[in-house]
Amino acid sequence: ILLEQWLRAWKWRQVLWDLRRVPAWRLFRATMAGYIPGMLVGFGTSALARSWLVARRSAVPTGTVLATAAVDRFIDLLAFAVLTGLAAALVALPVPDSALLRGLRWSGVALAALGFVAFAGLTVVRRGGLQRLATICPPRFRNALRRGLAELALGITWPRSRPRRAAIIAAALLVKAVAATQYLWAGLAFDVRLPIGNYLFLTALLGTLVLVGFFVRIPGSGLLASMFALELLGVPRAQALAITVTVVSSYMLTIVVAGGAALAGEGMSLATLRAAMRDPGPV
């Protein structure tokens, strides 16, 4: 789990490279710290928190750093679409042409389409297409909106170096591969071994539910889906429950402990961070 988060931070560093060369350890600490308010509040708080934490130490506007985080997530979305396609091709289900498998294939197509929509939106912001909003908003907010849109446009960037671009794409795919091994290690702890495609299937299915859960909150959906998918792959119910609890509890424990330590390392409390994000000041 920590390796996955470090790879995310390193990938983000490559996206930021042409704007500011921020050390990977600082981005890793900000990433982990950002999970804490994200878990408590949700609704994009995590991205805003980590962007603010990076901005306050790197002399880059918060909006600009937030835009680089959006570019980073756009790459993740495309990598996830590739993972979903691979999972649909490699998974070994009892019924090869089941409705679930067809749904997984269509979700890969939908993710790719969503990625192109996101790319179009980023392009519009990058070219100043939303500056017209400043002309129709109340005068007292006009300058702030123009400045905010300009900061966002500055952060929608792509490294000039081709090797760095390739590294970003490779890191995005590697992050997904590392995430898939969580079920591998937990399964081995309970003497469960599955074909490699099945681990990709588990990651793709649960990742899709996370995306859906961003819009529709369904308590316990991840736990139920994990158990359902493991049983569908032939894992006995008791072992499926043990693997699911191990993966989920390990993730939560790692995020809480490492995120809390990172937040303390930033010299921040939750109350201070909440107040700072409400009023980021000149940054």
Image: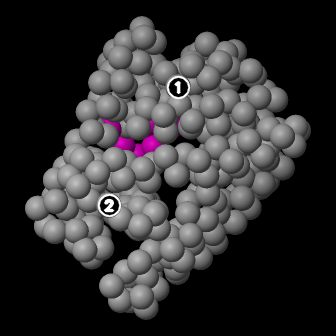
| Residue 52 in view of the camera | no
Residue 18 image-quadrant placement? top right
Residue type beneath disc 1:
Phe
Tell me the residue at 45%/43% (across/down): 44
Name the mark on residue 78: none
Q: Amino acid at mark 2?
A: Arg
Whether residue 242 appears in magenta in the rendering, the answer is no
Q: Which mark is residue 193?
A: 2
Decide which of 61, 136 is in the foreground and name it.
Answer: 61
Instruction: Give residue 273's position: percent from left, percent from top.
Output: 41, 20
Is residue 106 placed above or below 170 in the rendered structure?
Answer: below
Question: In x, y percent, where is residue 267?
Answer: 42, 8
| Furthest residue toward top | 267
Crowd around label 2: few <14 · some 14–19 · many ≥20 (10 Å): some
Image position of 56 with respect to 34: above or below: above
Q: Position of residue 282 (x, y in %)?
A: 63, 16
Which mark, residue 28? Answer: 1
Left or right placement of residue 67 versus residue 233 in this view? right
Question: Which residue reaches farthest left?
Answer: 238
Q: Residue at x 74, y 21 (%)?
A: 21
User: In the picture, which quadrant includes the N terminus?
Assistant: top left
Viewer-side label of 1, 2 = 2
User: Could you say whether the residue bearing mark 2 is in a helix, strand or loop?
Assistant: loop
* Identity of the residue drawn at 37% across and 80% down: 93
* CA neighbours of label 1 inside 10 A, class few (<14), some (14 to 19), many (20+): many
Judged left or right of residue 39, residue 46 is: right
Q: CA distance from mark 1 to mark 2?
A: 32 Å
Magenta highlight range: 39-48
In the figure, is residue 5 to the left or right of 132? left
Question: In what quadrant of the picture does the C terminus appear?
Answer: top right
Is 45 magenta? The answer is yes
